[in-house]
């Protein structure tokens, strides 16, 4: 299986604080990886380096064999990113957000129009014409995912995409993620919901900037003789604790 993403000895320092501490991992094409860790563990910082938004202090990242660096047009075309907080501009409507991002990607106007028509088929147009800050969280997430996918990326990075939504919306969102996998996409998801790791092909746990667990969720549970993802997560994090 080909490698979609390779991270080698990646480090990110902010002054005297080391947010990411020499992490390495690979993500094969067509897999779903769930990226877990406590608050401040380094998840979002890692995703931003993968996207080229942050420059690593050291180490390397390759996207389908192409070296990543800020504003690399070759990797930008392969990646889609749904940020935890900043995927959408709150003062713009859903339609205006689509127009704006379509312009950034230099997408044809007919394509952008079709995207808005497709969204209108399952979301009330009156809602899509509201400022996005006034739209219910579940619909905001759906719009953010559509915008993340506008450039038809091969590798999709989702930073806490189900945060703040109800269980039914979470279930529907994961159905969408499985649909993307079936379409051949490679997906990396950060989440605070430990049960979502059950949906993954791979689980990656980071704590204090270091990878403390990497592997198939079921195999990891068997290897550590635990019965749940929560027990697995606590086992990995506690093992790394200095206390």
Image (cartoon, rainbow, N blue to C red):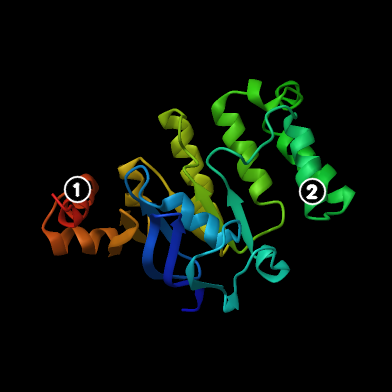
| Residue located farthest toward the right when viewing the structure as drawn | 109
Location of residue 52 by image quarter? bottom right
Mark earlier in primary sequence (1, 2): 2
- The percent coordinates of residue 36 (x first, y second) are 35, 50
Identified at 54% across, 55% down, the residue is: 48
Task: Indicate which disc residue 109 carries.
Answer: none
- The percent coordinates of residue 86 (x first, y second) are 61, 39
Q: Tag 2, which secondary structure? A: helix
- The percent coordinates of residue 198 (x first, y second) are 32, 50
166 vs 242, nearest the viewer: 242
90 vs 225, nearest the viewer: 90
Identified at 24% across, 49% down, the residue is: 229
Contact check, label 1 and label 2, Cβ < 8 Å = no
Q: Tag 1, which secondary structure? A: helix
Q: How many marks?
A: 2
Identified at 76% across, 46% down, the residue is: 101
Rounded to the nearest whole Å, what is the CA distance between mark 1 and mark 2?
42 Å
Neighbour tally class for label 2: few under 14, some 14-19, many 20 plus, Cα within 10 Å: many
| Residue located farthest toward the front when viewing the structure as drawn | 16
In the visual, does 235 lie left or right of 193? left
- The percent coordinates of residue 7 (x first, y second) are 45, 71
Location of residue 40 by image quarter? top left
Q: Nearer the viewer, mark 1 or mark 2?
A: 1
- Disc 2 target residue: 102
- Disc 1 target residue: 234
Neighbour tally class for label 1: few under 14, some 14-19, many 20 plus, Cα within 10 Å: few
Q: Is residue 197 above or below residue 95?
A: below
Location of residue 91 by image quarter? top right
Q: Is residue 188 visible?
A: no
In the visual, does 145 lie left or right of 117? left
């Amino acid at each position: 299986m080909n490698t979609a993403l390779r991270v080698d000895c990646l480090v990110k320092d902010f002054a005297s604080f080391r947010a990411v501490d020499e992490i390495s991992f690979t993500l094969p094409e067509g897999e779903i990886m769930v990226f877990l860790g406590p608050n401040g563990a380094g998840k979002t910082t890692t995703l931003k380096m993968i996207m080229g938004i942050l420059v690593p202090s050291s180490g390397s990242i390759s996207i389908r064999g192409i070296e990543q660096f800020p504003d690399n047009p070759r990797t930008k075309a392969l990646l889609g990113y749904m940020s935890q907080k900043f995927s959408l501009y709150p003062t713009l409507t859903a339609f205006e957000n689509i127009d704006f991002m379509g312009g950034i990607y230099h997408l044809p106007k007919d394509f952008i129009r079709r995207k808005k028509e497709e969204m209108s088929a399952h979301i009330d147009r009156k809602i899509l014409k509201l400022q996005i800050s006034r739209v219910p969280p579940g619909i905001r997430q759906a719009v953010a995912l559509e915008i993340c996918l506008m450039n038809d990326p091969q590798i999709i990075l989702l930073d806490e995409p189900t945060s703040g939504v109800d269980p039914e919306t979470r279930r529907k969102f994961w159905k969408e993620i499985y649909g993307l996998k079936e379409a051949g996409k490679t997906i990396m998801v950060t989440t605070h919901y430990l049960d979502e790791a059950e949906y993954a092909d791979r689980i990656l746990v980071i704590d204090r900037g270091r990878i403390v667990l990497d592997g198939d969720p079921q195999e990891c549970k068997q290897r550590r003789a635990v019965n749940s993802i929560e027990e697995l997560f606590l086992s990995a994090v506690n093992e790394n604790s200095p206390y």
